[in-house]
Amino acid sequence: MNQFQYVRAVSSKTAVATLAKDPSAKFIAGGTNLIDLMKNGVTAPQKLIDINNLPLAEIKKQANSLYIGALATNSGVADNKLVLQNQPLLAMALNAGASAQLRNVATVGGNMMQRTRCYYFYNTDLPCNKRQPGSGCGALEGINRMHAIFGFSQQCIAVHPSDMCVALAALDATVLVSRPKGDRKILFTDFHRLPGDHPEKDNTLAKDELITGVEIPDNSFGKNIHYLKVRDRASYAFALVSVAAALNIKNGTIKEARLAMGGVAHKPWRLTEAEKALVGKPASEETFKHAAEIAMQGAKGFKYNSFKLKMAPNTIIQALKTASATA
Ligand code: SF4
């Protein structure tokens, strides 16, 4: 492993100032992905800025939203009473991710910053535009079973691996960011980006910015929520396809709907057109099938992942059926 400096940040302000001064530095919190990347030689930061001492682990109810600090652990969020009362879809998605041991140390901010699990990205002997821009995409004509069916480019067909982020995209969350020239907010659906010609960039965070938390607006979905994850084994596996579904149903009619998919694109894939198709319609299998058809418009499979073209709509329909049945 390459040598690196290790420093502990004492405030968000000093953390971002230290990062701004050193282009190769990286923040570290739980380290569940970053340490793997360093061990595999995918990244070699000259400096690690440990942010674990910053007061960013709080979870609190605000006037119209729930605030979750960036250093709250995945298990701490999933088990938190306020989260279970106000945003149970988030808890369900978190519990579908990784393993209990990883959830105990992985943080909300780190979960958002985790990188794709594309095999070519982690193997430094193989071409990968995300790891080394201009080297090519090994997955495009290679083993692409886990890869994208939406929003990809000729440069990269990787998917974002998070479950938590799929729920946060569906729940209209906002990302809170600290930077040298003041704080700013980013809509969660604008945080992660599609690969385009720059697959090396996973998100819209600037080099000198630190995620300090997320805010999730209150909603009326109650128990009509479901997170369905389809994967190769029942635990500790990334999604082939996942769906976060939330419905507001009154007298059998859908008043409001939220849908997002994971495992299908370079970012959590919000299904706004399918949501529109659900609103005002009866909460029936026919409605859900129609919404799934709309959701799949524009999807394209590759040699080894075309099964997702069938799996994805089926997962949407099943997630909506389960969400609507828990009234
Ligand atoms: Fe690299 Fe993206 Fe291609 Fe995977 S899909 S090899 S991450 S460029």
Image (cartoon, helix red, strand yellow):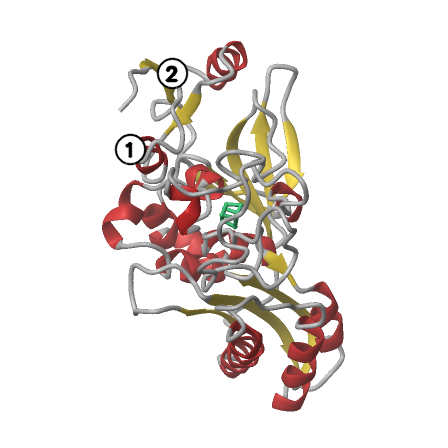
Left/right of residue 275 with respect to residue 116 in the rendered view? right
| Residue 208 sits in quarter | top right
Q: Which quadrant of the figure contains the N terminus?
A: top left
| Residue 41 in picture, x, y percent from top left | 34, 31
* Contact check, label 1 and label 2, Cβ < 8 Å: no
| Residue 178 sits in quarter | top right
- Tag in front: 1 or 2: 1
Left/right of residue 291 with respect to residue 132 in the rendered view? right
* Label 2 sits on residue: 47
| Label 2 Cα crowd, 10 Å radius (few <14 / some 14-19 / many 20+) | many
| Label 1 Cα crowd, 10 Å radius (few <14 / some 14-19 / many 20+) | few
CA distance separating discs 1 and 2: 15 Å
- The foreground one among 160 and 249 is 160
| Residue 135 in picture, x, y percent from top left | 53, 37
Amino acid type at image mark 2? Lys
| Residue 193 in picture, x, y percent from top left | 63, 44
Amino acid type at image mark 1? Lys
Badge 1 residue CB within 8 Å of ligand 1: no
Q: Residue furthest left?
A: 101
| Residue 243 in picture, x, y percent from top left | 52, 67
Give the vertical position of 253 relative to 299 (above or below). below
Disc 2 element: strand
* Label 1 sits on residue: 39
* Residue 141, disc: none
Q: Residue at x 30, y 20 (%)?
A: 2
Q: Residue furthest top?
A: 21
Give the vertical position of 85 relative to 296 (above or below). above
Left/right of residue 308 with respect to residue 181 in the rendered view? left
Q: Residue at x 64, y 47 (%)?
A: 194
Disc 1 element: helix
- The foreground one among 68 and 145 is 145
